[in-house]
Amino acid sequence: MIVILLLAGIYYAWTRLTAPQGVQKVAYTPAQKKCHSKGQLKYCVYRAKAGTNGDVVYHLHGRNLDEQIWNDDSYWTSMVQANWQRAKVLPPTVVVVSYGSTWLLVPKGKQPDSGLLDDFVTRLPDIEKKAGVPKRRLLLGESMGGLNVLIAGLTHPEKFAKIASLCPGVYAISPFDPFSKMKSALQRTGADPKIGFGIWWMAKIHVATEAEWKRISPLQLIKRADAQYPALYLSNGLYDSYGNFEGAQMLAERAQERGVSVEWHPLYGGHCAIDTSSLARFLIS
């Protein structure tokens, strides 16, 4: 018994000693923030203390995040702000939009959770009464938000000048495809099967039919694009456990074929590996 207690004590001490002792934080000056809500919608308006350039970036966040994420000093958003500050440029006003921890900007369909795309677009004038009327309106999002900005920007290209979509949930298959096709996609992309099931489940909550899926699939929406569409910034990690690399690369290629201005950043890394320097440049150029 004494030996067991001694070993348990050593193990406890070792796990405490070898556990991470802190977190790497970004050195930057946080933007000034004012938050608002209207029904299900919550959003925060962020303005750099040194001033802004007149553009407005709508940031649609990733899953399990919220409208407070822009000033998180351990998240990639603070690295973008630090990049602007080092370059001594006036950045855009940023509006982080949230409809909760998990949501998709789906047009109104048969599912109860559909219709947020219509709500978001309808609310833009009210949001801009607080954020300011933009010289240009841009979209930015990662993961779930990366898919949302593609849906919004490719459905309403006349409303947005640029779309920056990071590690977006773009897939070459449909959630209504047979299981054999889904299994093949998991093997081909190296996606985590548990994550794949979660994505399938999330899609089924928001869209009821194949036709509804095609209304939000970026690979379908890009078929009607031309050179007048918003400029696209796409990035994805090669070893994305969500299996997003394949779809993002296909989208970049098809957008280029349609004459859209595209920056494609294939990165060596996992889900939401982000080149914040090129992203920061894209958002102010």
Image (cartoon, rainbow, N blue to C red):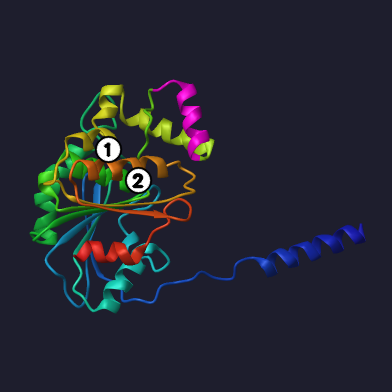
170 and 66: which is toward the camera: 170
Q: Which residue in the protein does label 2 denote? A: 168
First in sequence, mark 2 or 1: give its number: 2
> Residue 248: where, in percent of width, then height?
35, 44
**Labels 2 & 1 near each other (Cβ < 8 A):** yes
Residue at disc 1, secondary structure: helix
Q: Name the residue rendered at 35%, 45% in the picture.
A: 168
Q: Is residue 14 above or below residue 174?
A: below
Give the amino acid type for the residue marked by disc 1 in the picture: Pro
Residue 188 appears in the picture as rendered: yes
Give the image quarter of residue 200.
top left
Marker disc for residue 218: 1
Left or right of 166? Residue 117 is left
- Residue 138: x and y in percent read 18, 55
Query: Residue drawn 20% across and 30% down?
Result: 108
Please give the range of residues in magenta: 177-189
